[in-house]
Structures are given as structure tokens and as C-alpha cells.
Image (cartoon, rainbow, N blue to C red):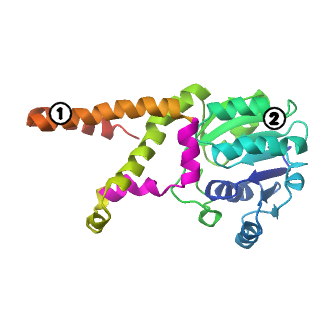
Amino acid sequence: MNNIKKIAIIGVGFMGGSLALALREKFSNISIWGYSRSKKTYDKLKKLKILDKVTRDCQILIKDADIVVLALPIKAIIEYFKIISPFLKPGAIIFDLGSSKKEIETQAHRLLPKTANFVGCHPLCGSEKSGAEFSNKDLYKGALCLIACFSNQRAARTVRGLWKSLGSKVLFIKSDWHDKVLSCVSHLPHIISFSLTQFIPQNYLKFSSGSFKDLTRISNSPAAVWTDIFLSNKKNILKDLNKFIRTLKTYENLLKKGNKNKITGLIDKVNAKQRRII
């Protein structure tokens, strides 16, 4: 990071804003810039003071940036590959925070200039919150950050060093395997949470308990972000969704038969498995 003078962030919401705060605290010698298309968001970011500089001019933002961060929904990340490409300086590093990786990897290789270095990242520390006003400088401390693809080993080492300097644990993983795993442990749980909230009648909500609130907390996650995630990883999610439906059918069949022993045994196995979750 010694040679890094400017980092530009596109998408200064909860994740991008938290990254800006963490970087400013750790690297006082690096200028952290943010981009806003709208005057309203520009004024908000200026007021929040989480960045060294804010601009509405993408060319000014990008032209001398050593690192460009895309903290956006997946389709927007791909769209910005095209927008920023003419302004990237040779050797610039671009990394994203997208929650699925294969489509982003494919489009990065297709759309970014050969002189740029792409690193596909996914820090596992999101929230149902959105908006720069919720930014948290400690968000990435202790979090696992997955690096799923990269075009240059030196760039990958630089990005790994950046995450580790913020207190994150870093793991390299293939993009295909990333999408398969995250479908099961993140994307499917969001579909389940959205579906459960949709299912409950409105007049039942006043009786909701802590368990219901735990299961449905993430159903307040932003629609634009999760629609892109679901569609970009639909092949894996559809497979997992079908498997999960079969699991629900197991409980349905045991309930129909009134098989107390098998229901108890099944829950006991789940209890043991849950206790192993870190």
C-alpha cells in the first residue's frame, strides 16, 4: 500500500461508506474519494464527511486513482466497468464487493482494459441496512473477505494487504465455488426470509416473537441489491431451493404420519449441527 495515493469509491452506501471510514482511519496518507451522480446524494456525502473528497465527475474521480472500488449492485458493477474504462490509468486496480462472482469475473475480463488489474472481492459482513449514514469504520474488522478472481497476482497481493490491514481475514476461492457456497449459506437464506415475511398475515405481526424477528431481520435488505444477486446466481439458487423444498417435505411427511420419534431425532441432529456453527 506504500505506493497508493488515491482510492476512488463508486457506491458510497453502507458498505462503501464503511470502507471509506476504515481506510481513512488506517491510511491517513491516502486520499479517499467518493462519487455521486445526484446532487442530493452529493450534498449528503459532503455533510457526512466520511470521504476526503466527493465529486459528481466520474472522469475526475477515476483518472489518477490507484485503486477503484465498486460497492454497487451486481448489474451496476458491470455497467461501471464500461463507464470507468476510458479513464483508468495504466496499472490501476479495480475491485468490487459483489455477492456473486462468476458473472462479474466474466464481464471484467471482457470490458476492462488489459492495462487494468481486476480483483473480485466479497467481504462477508453485510447488513440489511443501506445508506452511507449507517457507515461503520469497524465493519470489516474480524470479517472474512473472499477473493474469488484476479487478473494479476501483484494486484491480488495488494488488495489482500488492504483487507488484512483493516482487520479482515482473507481467503482465496474460485468464483464457481464461491457462487455455489454463497447460494447455500447466504442467497437461499435471504429467499427464505423474504418468503416468510411475505407469508405471515399482516394482522399476525403484532404477536411476533423474537424467533420470528431473528428469521426475518434480513428481509429488510434492499430489493435492488438482492434482485441482482438472485438473477446472477440463479442456477445455483434454483438447485438449492429445490433441495430445501425437499427438506421441508420431510417435515411435512413426518407431521402427517405423527411420527414423534423421527421428528425428535431429526431436530436432535439439527441441534448438534447448529452448535458447530461458528
Image quadrant in which you'd find residue 174? top right
In which quadrant is the C terminus drawn? Answer: top left
SS at circle 1: helix
In which quadrant is the N terminus drawn? Answer: top right
Say which of 57 and 265 sits in front: 57
Residue type, label 1: Asn
Q: Which residue is mark 1?
A: 253
Q: Position of residue 206 (x, y in %)?
A: 29, 69
SS at circle 2: loop
Q: Position of residue 2 (x, y in %)?
A: 83, 44
The relative height of residue 4 versus residue 153 in the rendered view (above or below) is below
Magenta segment main secondary structure? helix
Q: Position of residue 246 (x, y in %)?
A: 30, 31
Q: Which residue is mark 2?
A: 112
Decide whether residue 230 is among the magenta residues.
Answer: yes
Task: Please provide the residue range marked out in magenta.
Answer: 212-232
Count of residue discs: 2
Residue type, label 2: Leu
Callout 2 touching callout 1 (CB < 8 Å):
no
